Image: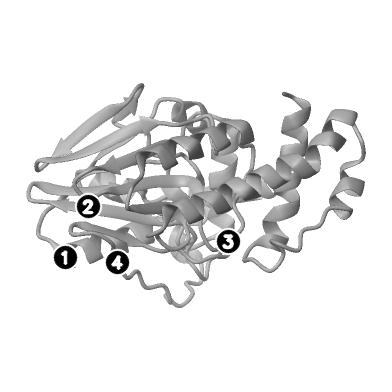
C-alpha cells in the first residue's frame, strides 16, 4: 500500500507541492591523499532532514578531469558535491564509478549525467536496475525523502557496464576497477588508485557503525575482505564512516562482525531452530553501543540465518 500511495502521489503532485524543510546539510570534502577527497555521510537512517546523506562519495582530481566514486543518496547532494569539486579544481567531472546499485549511492547519478560525466558500473547492476524492487524503493523514497527525492528523480543506467577488471586512465592517473561480488551485493566494485595508494571499497568495509548486510553473500564478502587486505592500500575509503588510515584494523572489524553473525546463527540455521530464540540468547554486547545497532543488527542476523540455510 505504501508503494501504491507513493506512485500515485508522484504522478499527481509536482515536487513544489511539498513543504520544503530547511536545508541543513553541508558537504565538506576531506583530503586524504595528494589528489583524493571524500565526503562523509551521517551514521544514521536516511530521512528528509538529512537528504539521504547516509553514504560516502569520493573523488580524484587529475590534470585532465575528475573521477567520482559513488553519487550519493539524492540529486541535491550530488549537486552540492559538484559545487564543492568546483571550489577545488576547474576540471570537469568526466566519470562516475558506481560501487554498487544501492539507493543511497545512486540517486545522485542523474546530476552527474547531466553534467556530462560517463557512468561506469558492474554489469550485474542491470538486474537490480530493471527489477520491481528498484522501482518500489524509488517510489518509497519519493515519500520518505521528499522534497529532495521526488517525481523528477529517476534511476540511471551505466554508460559502460564492467564485465571484468578494467583500468580507466584519466589525466595519466590509473583507476583499477575490479569486480568483487557477490559480496555485499552481487555487483560490488572496488577502485584502486595506485598513484594515490587509495582504495575505494564501497560497502565492503564499514567503519564506526554496524554494517548493513541485507541480502549479502556473507561467505563471498569475507573472501572479498581477503582480496582488499592483499592490495595493502595506505588509505581505504568505504561507503560509510570515516576514511581508514589503518585498513587492517577496519577490515578486521567488518570481518569479525560477519564471522560472529555466521558463528552465532549457523547452528540454529542448519538445525532449523527458532531464529527468535537464538537471537535472544546471543551476546551482542560488543556491538550494541554502535550507531545503527537497533535498526540493522536484528535484520542482519536474520538475513545471515536465512542465507546459511540456503548454502
Which numbered mark, 4 or 3, is in the foreground of this view? 3
Which badge, 1 or 2, comes first in the chain's sequence? 2
Residue at numbered disc 3? 209
Residue 67, image x, y percentages: 22, 47
Q: Which residue is mark 4?
A: 29
Task: Name the residue that disc number 2 marks.
Answer: 60
Q: Earlier in the sequence, mark 4 or mark 2?
A: 4
**Mark 1 → mark 2, Cα distance in angstroms:** 11 Å
> Judging from the image, what secondary structure is the residue with disc 1 in?
helix
Residue 155 percent coordinates (x, y): 43, 40
Judging depth in this view, the residue of 163 and 153 nearest the camera is: 163
Q: Position of residue 22 (x, y in %)?
A: 45, 78
Residue at position x 54%, y 63% in the image:
208
Q: Which mark is residue 88?
A: 1
Q: Are marks 1 and 4 in contact (CB under 8 Å)?
A: yes
| Label 3 CA crowd tier, 10 Å (few <14, some 14–19, many 20+) | some
Amino acid at each position: 500500500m505504501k508503494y501504491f500511495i507513493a506512485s500515485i502521489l508522484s504522478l499527481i503532485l509536482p515536487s513544489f507541492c511539498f513543504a520544503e524543510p530547511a536545508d541543513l546539510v553541508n558537504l565538506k570534502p576531506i583530503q586524504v591523499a595528494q589528489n583524493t577527497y571524500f565526503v562523509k555521510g551521517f551514521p544514521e537512517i536516511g530521512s528528509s532532514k538529512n537528504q539521504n546523506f547516509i553514504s560516502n562519495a569520493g573523488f580524484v582530481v587529475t590534470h585532465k578531469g575528475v573521477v567520482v566514486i559513488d553519487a550519493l543518496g539524492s540529486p541535491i547532494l550530488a549537486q552540492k558535491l559538484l559545487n564543492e569539486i568546483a571550489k577545488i579544481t576547474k576540471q570537469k567531472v568526466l566519470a562516475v564509478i558506481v560501487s554498487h546499485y544501492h539507493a543511497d549511492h545512486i540517486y545522485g547519478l542523474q546530476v552527474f549525467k547531466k553534467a556530462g560525466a560517463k557512468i561506469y558500473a558492474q554489469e550485474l547492476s542491470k538486474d537490480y536496475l530493471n527489477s520491481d524492487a528498484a522501482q518500489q524503493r524509488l517510489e518509497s523514497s519519493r515519500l520518505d525523502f521528499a522534497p529532495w527525492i521526488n517525481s523528477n528523480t529517476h534511476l540511471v543506467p551505466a554508460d559502460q557496464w564492467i564485465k571484468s577488471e578494467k583500468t580507466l586512465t584519466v589525466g595519466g592517473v590509473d583507476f583499477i576497477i575490479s569486480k568483487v561480488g557477490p559480496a555485499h551485493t552481487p555487483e560490488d566494485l572496488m577502485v584502486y588508485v595506485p598513484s594515490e595508494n587509495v582504495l575505494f571499497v564501497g560497502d565492503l568495509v564499514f567503519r564506526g557503525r554496524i554494517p548493513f548486510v541485507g541480502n549479502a553473500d556473507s561467505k563471498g564478502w569475507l573472501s572479498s575482505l581477503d582480496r582488499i587486505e592483499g592490495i595493502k592500500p595506505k588509505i581505504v575509503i568505504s561507503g560509510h564512516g570515516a576514511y581508514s588510515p589503518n585498513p587492517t584494523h577496519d577490515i578486521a572489524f567488518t570481518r569479525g562482525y560477519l564471522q560472529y553473525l555466521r558463528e552465532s546463527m549457523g547452528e540454529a540455521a542448519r538445525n532449523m531452530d527458532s531464529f527468535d530464540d537464538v537471537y535472544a540468547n546471543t551476546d551482542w554486547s560488543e556491538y550494541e553501543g554502535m550507531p545503527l545497532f537497533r535498526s540493522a543488527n536484528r535484520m542482519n542476523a536474520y538475513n545471515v540465518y536465512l542465507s546459511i540455510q540456503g548454502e
